[in-house]
Amino acid sequence: MTIENIDKKFVLNTYARNYVNFVSGTNATLTDDKDNKYIDFTSGIGVVSVGHGNKIVAETIYKQVSNITHISNLYAIEPQALLAQKIVELSGYDMACFFGNSGAEANEGAIKIARKYGHEKFDDKKFKVVTLENSFHGRTITTVKASGQSAMHKDSFSPYPDGFSFDASIKDIYDSIDEKTVAVMIELVQGEGGVQPLDKKDVQDLASYLKKNDILLIVDEVQTGAYRTGEFLASNLYDITPDIITMAKGVGGGVPIGIVLTTKKDLLVPGDHGSTFGGNYLSSSTSLSVCNILQEIKENGSLDKTIEYFNSKMDSFYENNKNIFTQNVGLGLMKGLRVKDADTLSTIVSNGFDEGVLVLKAGQNTLRFLPPLTITNEEIDLGFKRLEDAVKNI
Ligand SMILES: Cc1ncc(COP(=O)(O)O)c(C=O)c1O
């Protein structure tokens, strides 16, 4: 049987898959089983931040699993403590961390912290969480409900947890806050919703309004975190201090990890929250290695140069193809091009694949780029050359 047959027979049908079989990877270049090479402008949807086949990360993983892979959170885990220290230092915030395994799980943790805050702090419990209509926060029942995109709230999975409401824009949030609102949860650059950065001043105004009114600000940095927008956190770029931040994807470089950071360091007590795998030796030591690599390329200036180079190529690609693209959006290495219609978007992704460059969709009309943060100029050049070929007959 082919991989496709086995997959179709034994794996639940939840993804519209392309049945290419990638067998090796080096930085932003993937090779399939027929020896075709692809430039990866997706990094596994913003995950492989330090590239495929990273030798420093591989060495860290090998050393760690040759020794201890997992014990449990009932004992101290040295790399977990060191990772928490590193994340807090890089964030610049006075926070502490909880470790889970995914973005959705991190957001669940964030919502639990907010709900407990609403319970402990106020005589009459506050529990409502306001999010944005175009947001995406995950696939568990609660985070599906927290995601504002109405297409996510399928009847087939109902009933959903109470206490979530959605606003079209950040300026509308003020009106929907009531005496039961405990938190507002936002992505600073909406990823799945179309690579849409929120306005900095609007975010800062909202952050100070929430602080004055003792309502928590949760920033979902699952996609924007770990230098994706050029700073360690997009919250740093927006110059705000959220109460709770969630991370996942790129901070693990490919190992499953989810992190909740919060200023409410003493709120949760033993028994309130937990995870079997969260922050184990494997994921913590890998993430620590990834953070060290990313910190180094930020501090030696090479990340900023890569962002600049990628964006200059992206600008030219946009200018050359204004018959197809209507807007150039995003921040850092989280970028998007709005496409004139959904069919054309699908054609570009598929033609791109045929030409040997992987790109993503976001929403109905955005061509999305999330390359590894370590991508080389040569890989960037080749990727955009192939994309020009992919769009030339459109
Ligand atoms: C902003 C944001 N939050 C949460 C999630 C969910 O993360 P995960 O798929 O790791 O559960 C995603 C995934 O795309 C995301 O982009």
Image: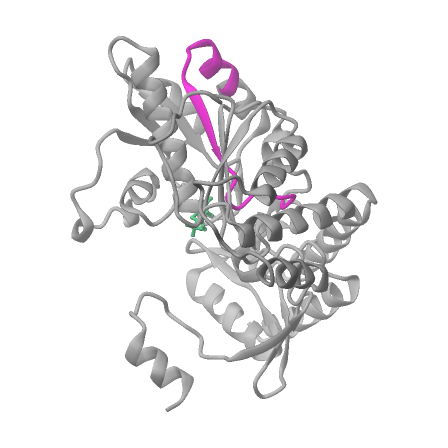
How many numbered marks does the figure carry? 0
Q: Position of residue 355 (x, y in %)?
A: 61, 78
Q: Examine the rendered structure and indicate whether residue 213 appears above or below residue 57.
A: above
Q: Residue at x 25, y 29 (%)?
A: 163
Quadrant of the drawing holding the C terminus: bottom right
Q: Residue at x 72, y 57 (%)?
A: 374
Left or right of 312 in this view: 97: left
Q: Position of residue 256 (x, y in %)?
A: 49, 54
Residue 387 quadrant: bottom right
Q: Is any part of residue 364 visible from this angle? A: yes
Quadrant of the drawing holding the N terminus: bottom left
The one nearer the camera, 68 or 327, is 68
Q: Residue at x 28, y 23 (%)?
A: 127
The one nearer the camera, 137 or 190, is 137
Q: Examine the rendered structure and indicate whether residue 386 appears above or below residue 86.
A: below
Q: Examine the rendered structure and indicate whether residue 336 appears above or below residue 82.
A: below
Q: Position of residue 359 (x, y in %)?
A: 56, 64
Q: Point out the stretch of residues depicted in magenta.
A: 207-228
Residue 388 quadrant: bottom right
Q: Is residue 256 magenta?
A: no
Q: Is any part of residue 327 visible from this angle? A: no
Q: Is residue 220 magenta?
A: yes
Left or right of 169 in this view: 247: right
Q: Residue furthest bottom?
A: 1
Q: Position of residue 377 (x, y in %)?
A: 78, 62
Left or right of 360 in this view: 106: left
